[in-house]
Amino acid sequence: MQYDISRTSRLGNREANQDRVTALERDSAVLLVLGDGLGGKAGGEIASQALVDTAAAQFEQADLPIAQPAAFLKDVMFRAHRAIIEAGKAAEPPVEPATTAVLCLVQNGRALWAHTGDSRFYLFRNGLSLYRTEDHSYVEELYQKGQISLDKRQGHPMRGYLTQCLGQTTKVPGIQISQEVALREGDTLLLCSDGLWEPLDDAQIGAVLFEPPLRESLNALAERAEQISYPSSDNISAVVLRVTSVQAKSATTRKIADKPTQHSPSDRLQDAIEEIEQVIEQYRDEMDN
């Protein structure tokens, strides 16, 4: 598989950037990692950095391809959780730092992701959101129960209250792990903090990221989020991987530049609708319960 990767991390209107983001590459595998340190707790940057460091160490030691990717991602999360607690104890004075976490492993032309907190993973196909993680937050729970509307969710005063995160307490965090998804040419994987997604809707994000080249589209997206949120913009961080070819990458082949697809807009829309219908059918039993 061939791909392009771009990332960004902006201060926004905050005094410090407590987000951490990285893209780790080894042979034919990629691990994308993003953590948003909780600003309401001291040492948010300690927690998000411990997440990135733990993920890097575990990915470097892993045998590729990783035979049990779901177990690998869960292990990284739990190790990071313990590392965050220990780092907080070692700080002067001791603190109880915490962070959101979202990871995505790409190997063998397939993607698998895990998260805790309200940092998000998206998989966009033809500019439309095919998959998106569900926030671990108090407001999201209210919305899923039908107790508040979408408009109320976006402006709710308790939207920053998380129900799950790494660190803060010794309690094992709740972690949600996806099924593996086969990737197609043009698929775009996005990991981002709430500073990026909160001011925008999924359609806006997908439309901007659909336009090549990738670096310019990601910067334009971050700039838009920052302008909408001004003068109270949060840290804005994201890492994006766009699949440019599902063919194996030879040793002499470099990452190729973004190129627009040759399909018409109506073809792209119909393809995306069919994909979404397939996902709905796949999870119909779960949604009916």
Image (spheres, rainbow, N blue to C red):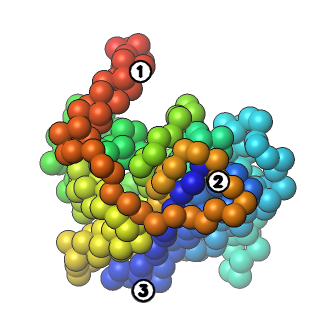
- Front one among 202 and 3: 3
Q: CA distance from mark 3 to mark 1?
A: 43 Å
Residue name at image x 39 percent, y 54 percent = 161
Task: Say which label, 3 or 1, has the lower sequence index.
Answer: 3
Q: Measure the alpha-carbon separation of dots 2 and 3.
A: 42 Å
- Residue at which label 3 appears: 15
User: Residue 86 lies in what quarter of the image?
Assistant: bottom right
Mark 1 lies on a secondary structure that is loop
How far from the left and from the top, in percent, is residue 231?
23, 81
Q: How many marks?
A: 3
Of 250 and 163, nearer the camera is: 250
Return the residue at label 2. Answer: 249
- Indicate left or right for 288 with 264 as reference: right
- The local crowd at label 2, few if under 14, some if 14 to 19, many if 20 or more residues have their Cα within 10 Å, is some
Amino acid on which the number 1 mark rests in the picture: Tyr
Front position in the image: 248 or 211: 248
Disc 2 vs disc 3: Cβ atoms closer than 8 Å? no
Check the image and report above or below for 112 versus 102.
above
In primary-sequence order, the first of circles 1 and 2 is: 2
**SS for tag 3?**
loop
Query: In the drawing, what numbered circle is on residue 283?
Result: 1
Q: Position of residue 236 (x, y in %)?
A: 39, 71
Quarter occupied by residue 269: top left
Measured as percent of width and height from the top left, residue 216 is found at 35, 73
